Amino acid sequence: NGGGMNGSSTMMDFLEEPLPGVGTYEDFNTIDWVREKSRDRDRHREITSRSKESTWALIHSVSDAFSGWLLMLLIGLLAGSLAGLIDISAHWMTDLKEGVCLIGFWFNHEHCCWKSNTNFEDRDQCPEWQSWSQLLLGHGEGAFAYILNYFMYVLWALLFSLLAVLLVKGFAPYACGSGIPEIKTILSGFIIRGYLGKWTLIVKTITLVLAVSSGLSLGKEGPLVHVACCCGNILCHLFTKYRKNEAKRREVLSAAAAAGVSVAFGAPIGGVLFSLEEVSYYFPLKTLWRSFFAALVAAFTLRSINPFGNSRLVLFYVEFHMPWHLLELVPFILLGIFGGLWGAFFIRSNIAWCRRRKTTKLGKYPVLEVFVVTAITAILAFPNEYTRMSTSELISELFNDCGILDSSKLCEYVNDFNSTKGDDLPDRAAGPGVYTAMWQLALALVMKLFITIFTFGMKVPSGLFIPSMAVGAIAGRLLGVAMEQLAFYHHDWAIFSGWCSQGADCITPGLYAMVGAAACLGGVTRMTVSLVVIMFELTGGLEYIVPLMAAAMTSKWVADAIGREGIYDAHIRLNGYPFLEAKEEFSHKTLAMDVMRPRRSDPPLTVITQDSMTVEDVEAVVNETTVYPVMVSRESQRLVGFVLRRDLVISIENARKKQDGIVSTSVIYFTDHAPPLPPSSPSMLKLRSILDLSPFTVTDQTPMEIVVDIFRKLGLRQCLVTHNGKLLGIITKKDVLKHIAQLANQDPDSILFN
């Protein structure tokens, strides 16, 4: 390869072969949505054109079109199966803290007593199930038996939580937390390698069971979304079009997120709406139907695996016997105000605690933190039966409408069955059990209000849906019982006289608990439509959509008045992820020239010429930035396109290894034809295949309002700034986010990634 032209012709053949790594992205970087969608369109056009040439090509075209639905089926089956495994294991290990089944240690308390001959009132005290004091001491009464049960409860809780944090710390650091903030960022185009990998899936599945069973104030619903997205990401590798295209993969992950919510709550429709409203960045119509299909498959898979657990068709089935009255909207709105205030308080407190954890020595000792929080939680939880039981059981009991056969303290009213018709019980005076339950619930509310702040964000899997719902359900039940007793003793007041006569069943405390749960969850997450649909699917209460919507909207308005961010957006900003919120309006009057780099006082922008720089010249500037505009020449400043640093480095390294004659003085050119050089020159390197010839450009006078809209709606990674056709600078997604943070009086350096 002595001559330049011979070398260039050989190099052209070499570069027509696809290089491994070219067109991919570095870790903690944003994908180029426009480039990914363009690649997919080119691939689809090629398959369509080839399908007319042969039968085999036609079959390949049909299988390519069907592969998306097959992938949704596999995601639904895998996510539902794992959710069933988690559900069954968590129920068993939660009950293990209190006792063991004699006929089979693998049975939880409920399953152990299924075949027992005990009567209905004593169904939870069957002889087949024994507490630890009964097993070790032979009896369950007395102070020593109570202390032993207390000790075993705390011991199992500490064992489960410590095992969870050690597994996370040692094998999969990404398995901690909820996962929804990171998934929301990934779906917007960000790359976090390993976050949705197989090790994260395995460790999160195991540690989620341990964390929930420990009794910490957390739920498994958010982490189940992470688990489902891990399933989707891993299964994407079975199909070429999803494995090699980051934009197509994110369509799959949006559907997987819907499947995750579906298995968490038994809410396929709500899961799709949650994915659309809360986490997805790009959600075309076909993804909507595929998401619904994946969510349905996941829900029915879970139901078939665990048909008798909390994974029934609805999670908290309710059957209220009286409709709500229009005047009850006032206490429902009060619950919405409480939910909004709690949401804003929780977000500020939790973010402050997490920031302290990151900036002080506290963050260096995650195992100690988990140990201390678990110990405090278990010690405070055991004496109170409403904090000792699992949070899902607590919510189910709070949603319950008292019937004749109910033996709960919440249903210990002064009985008067003279006016009873079927299961409809009139409003009655509260008995001693109700007053005891109210005090216990008030203490449980205070505990959960504060302990959840310190629990969410620890180095164990931790969801926020169920703890938030528990806070609201407790507050709602307390208000509901108060309203019920007010109506009973003062039914002649003007507010009750028109619709609540003496002896009538007017107030349903369980409905207040349901509305309170929706209000607090909405205040923390700022969900609206998807929240109401999830609550409807959770409970099966279609006629209560108006109270739920009133509470959800009120909580969102109140929380938004205090702080605009929901908990997931707040954690995204805390971690410095480059997430550009599509719902926020940009109303400032700044221009592209105010944001672009370089600024007036900075050195000029690093550029590459199209046919005059050597390998040595390019390697000298390759670490200065991530994007390199390609110019005709330094004198003309006329833009040809741009290349990415990763593609440039990989191409040069491959050429040095596999192409003879490429040395430091070899000229790199991005044109169709090699430039004229002396015959004695070394082989030239043609890199036109990695050049993006259609860069997005704006002028320096373009309002930033338009630039921000372009970045949001097209998913841009960067755009170039010109003046009279000449290149001035570049604006990246990170620059836009820093500018928005600066205008909002936030620290622009908190944006860590591009």
Image (spheres, rainbow, N blue to C red):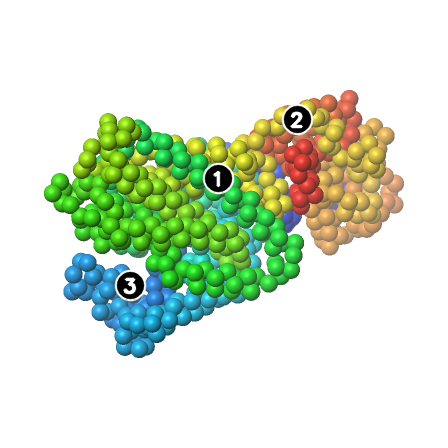
Label 2 sits on what residue type? His
Disc 3 crowd, CA 10 A, few/some/many (<14, 14-19, 20+): many
**Residue 738: x percent and y percent?**
68, 38
Seen at 57% across and 31% down, the residue is 584
Quarter of the figure with residue 633: top right
**Residue 336: x percent and y percent?**
42, 36
Q: Nearer the viewer, residue 701 or 563?
A: 563
Q: Earlier in the sequence, mark 2 or mark 1?
A: 1
**Residue 109 got which mark?**
3
**Residue 32: x percent and y percent?**
61, 38
Q: Give the Cα distance between marks 3 and 1.
A: 37 Å
2 vs 1, front mark: 1
Label 1 sits on what residue type? Leu
Q: Nearer the viewer, residue 209 or 74?
A: 209
Seen at 35% across and 52% down, the residue is 439
Image position of 348 with respect to 214: above or below: above
Residue 244 visible to the viewer: no
Q: Give the Cα distance between marks 2 and 1.
A: 29 Å
Image position of 80 with respect to 107: above or below: above
